[in-house]
Amino acid sequence: MTRQHIHLNPARSQQGATLMVVLIFLMVLSMLGVAAVQNNIFQEKMSGNTRDRELAFEAAEAAVRDASANIISLRAGPWTGGGGLSTYDANNANDSTYWNTSSNWSSYRNPSATVAKVATQPQYRIEKKPNIGTVEYYRVTARGFGADSTTIVIIQAEFTYTP
């Protein structure tokens, strides 16, 4: 039996295919990693904005609660206007454009208790609407701010009092 020796030229048999496959694989993994980081940053911004909006909403709700207590005390004395108290004007538009105009907040009141973690304390206006029979109507419009002063939530509530 004879032995045959096969001599392979190592420089000739290696074409670099493995290196190319590994480089392509690393490039795909890098792109997936960058996409995952960008998605994570986007998700973090969304959750921060949601938290800021919720903070503004809670501040506006605190203002409405304060206004409802204020309405009870207003009933004990005359309606004086000013300081967050005004007479309802049906000619005023009741839309976001009207309430987002800062001049329409020239007469407002801050709640008696301060709200933590907000850029600006919430504000509210109480409007005395016309009575219907013996029932008195009040509309409260409250504006709450988040941790960023550009985050604003405006809510309205209507209260009635029947003597």
Image (tube, helix red, strand yellow):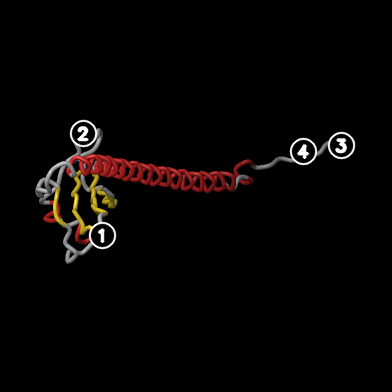
Residue beneath the point at 26% across and 44% down = 64
Q: Position of residue 107 (x, y in %)?
A: 11, 50
Q: Quadrant of the N terminus?
A: top right
- Which amino acid, mark 1? Ile
Provide the secondary structure element on which disc 2 rests.
loop
Q: Nearer the viewer, mark 4 or mark 2?
A: 2
Per the image, the residue denoted by label 1 is 132
Per the image, the residue denoted by label 3 is 2
Q: Is residue 46 left or right of residue 148?
A: right
- Which amino acid, mark 3? Thr
**What is the spatial separation of the Cα atoms under label 2 and label 3, in whole angstroms?**
99 Å
Q: Nearer the viewer, mark 4 or mark 1?
A: 1
Contact between marks 1 and 3 (CB within 8 A): the answer is no
Q: Earlier in the sequence, mark 4 or mark 2?
A: 4
Q: Earlier in the sequence, mark 2 or mark 3?
A: 3
> Crowding at label 3, few (<14), some or many (≥20) Cα neighbours within 10 Å?
few
Per the image, the residue denoted by label 2 is 114
Q: Position of residue 39 (x, y in %)?
A: 43, 46
> Crowding at label 4, few (<14), some or many (≥20) Cα neighbours within 10 Å?
few
**What is the spatial separation of the Cα atoms under label 1 and label 2, in whole angstroms?**
35 Å
- Which amino acid, mark 4? His
